Image (cartoon, rainbow, N blue to C red):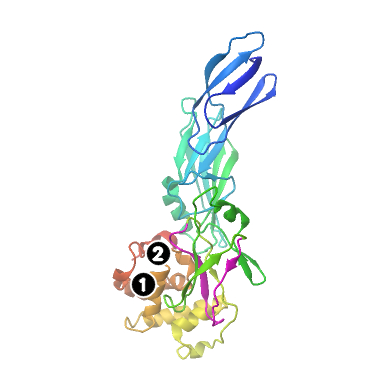
Amino acid sequence: GWGAEELHCLTPDIQVKKQTDDTWMFTYNGSGNIPEKIDAVVLWSGNPEKAQIQLPFPGVGVFAYDRKANRIQNDQHISASNLIGMRLNILPGHHQLVRVALRIIDRNQSNRSMLETLDVGPSKPIKIIRMIDFQEDIDRLLSITDDLDALIHFSIVFGDNPVFRLYINRYSFTPNKLDDIWSVPKIIMEQLNPTVSDLKLKLYVQRIDQPGEDLHEVKLCESGQLVLPNRGDETSPWLLYSGQESDFFIRPTLLNSNDVQYDQNQDHVHGSLGFAIRIMDPDKRKSAIKTSLQRLSTDPNDPDWHIVEGLAREFHHLPLSTIDVWKQAILIPDFMATLITKSKTFSDGFMDKFVIELPYMFE
């Protein structure tokens, strides 16, 4: 109702557009903290003198940024291991009730959720929250399931209406596959554009039945296609995964295409744990791995322990639910007890991951 003829904003990164005679739209286009107040120059009809005024920023909504100040879009998938430096700038406007809602979705239908009310009000036009402050809650929800693809809906709710949502996985994205061609999704490739960000993605493939013996870096083309190295033995379980230095974490993916012949009665002949890991059928693989781990739990000098130690060394930064060996290990107390005695050579915090990431408690 000002009847303003012109309005120019002096505050950086604020765009102003006149919508009607009485309505002006202010849009923030920056990447930093949203200003609580804005400076503007106003010219009224019939008054030749311009006036400089200061206004509270009339924003409503949520702006999210990663640790490098890149904008995170609504409904974007992010990795639970990549929350450091990530923040949400919340502008509640006239809303007095603002809440954070977390809900886990997994194949086991765990159906657990959490709700937290944020302190907002007229004296706090902007509320800034750090995602790392919710790390413990996120880890607690993910720890109730061994489903690698478990998903947490992280929502900002104004009143009863969700206005912003993130999907939090144990990984950042799933690779695309068309016939025998693997590729990175377009939305990830756009964020990897060196002209707009310095984010990086390093991918590798490695045999998990012989960890540490065959490690190859995967070339990423500008089109997003992955150039996989010649993997030789097609019955070997080659794992495609992100390096620890990456800003994005691909869903760890097994690339083996052919099965091995399995006879449970002959498991000891077929190479025990290494052979068990190569079985493609999930139920048969888990059964064979469990049998192998039960044998290892009675003999700390069994040669197959070098496979277990290799898995802990090579893939310590990946979610434990990536490797069936760890999911079966927590079902065998004697094996876990022996694993602890060998953990001095593992990376710091590796054994803690069993409690944080899997439904397991040390006795």
Q: Amino acid at mark 2?
A: Phe
- Front-most of residues 243 and 149: 243
Q: Amino acid at mark 1?
A: Met
Question: Which quadrant of the structure image shows residue 29?
Answer: top right
Q: Which residue is mark 2?
A: 354
Quick check: marks 1 and 2 in contact, CB under 8 Å? yes
Q: CA distance from mark 1 to mark 2?
A: 10 Å
Q: Position of residue 243 (x, y in %)?
A: 46, 63
Label 2: how many Cα within 10 Å (few below 14, some 14–19, many 20+): many
Q: Is residue 193 above or below residue 264?
A: above
Q: Position of residue 191 (x, y in %)?
A: 56, 51
Left or right side of 213 for 260: right
Q: Which residues are magenta?
A: 224-246
Tell me if residue 343 is in the magenta stretch: no
- Front-most of residues 66 and 263: 66
Question: Which quadrant of the structure image shows residue 298?
Answer: bottom left
Question: Which quadrant of the structure image shows residue 234?
Answer: bottom right
Quarter of the image where the C terminus is located = bottom left
Tell me if residue 234 is in the magenta stretch: yes
| Mark seen at residue 336 | 1
Q: Position of residue 358 (x, y in %)?
A: 44, 63
| Name of the residue lying farthest toward the right | 20
| Name of the residue lying farthest toward the front | 195
